[in-house]
Image (tube, helix red, strand yellow):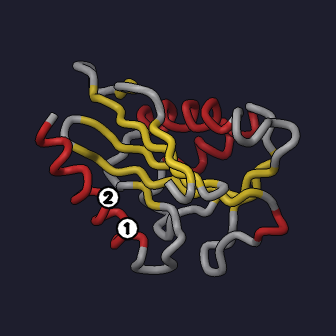
Amino acid sequence: MKTLRILLPLVLALLVSACATTRPTMSYVAPELAPSEATVLASDTASHLATPLPPAKSTVVLDPPANRSADVLTPVLLSALRAAGYGVIEADRQTGPKSAEGTPVRYLVSPLENGVLLRLQYLGTEATRFYTRTADGGVVASGPFIVREAGQ
């Protein structure tokens, strides 16, 4: 647990610096993310967003990562959100989301110790969840989303 406390700020700093290479508000998906892991993360993202952004009443504007070839999450996330009842728009990779289109959602996914860290950013809120790797190579949530609202 002490190792996690030490490594978490370091990983978060690396994620922020990785996002700053193109537009500072872009999402990031680690190239090592497996398609099976992307499915779990996409499903959990759609479930989590149902409370702050009700499906059928919300349009989500995904701000995708710059590197489309290494991004296995965005296509699965688009499908999961649409299946949950959201209107979904993929923002332009050069100019980013426009507020008039809907609610911008950014996602940052990175490996951490023996798992994957998912961060969601929407409506001035950041929700973070850690997924532990299982013996068969999959991932499972190791706890609830930790939610921090702006100003906290």
- Describe residue 77's horizontal placement relative to residue 98 as left or right: left
Q: State whether residue 16 is above or below residue 37.
A: below
Q: What element carries label 2?
A: helix
Q: Name the residue under label 1.
A: 16
Query: Which residue is at a point 66% across and 55% down the rendered structure image?
Result: 123
Query: Which residue is at a point 25% across and 45% down the rendered structure image?
Result: 112
In which quarter of the view is residue 45 placed?
top right
Residues at marks 2 and 1 touching, judged by CB atoms closer than 8 Å: yes
Q: State whether residue 83 is above or below residue 18.
A: above
Name the residue type under label 1: Val
Q: Name the residue under label 2.
A: 12
Quadrant showing the N terminus: top left
Work out whether residue 85 or residue 104 is closer to the camera in this orientation and state it.
104
Of all residues, the one furthest to the front in this rendering is 152
- Residue 85: x and y, percent? 80, 35
- Describe residue 37's horizontal placement relative to residue 48 as left or right: left
Name the residue type under label 2: Leu
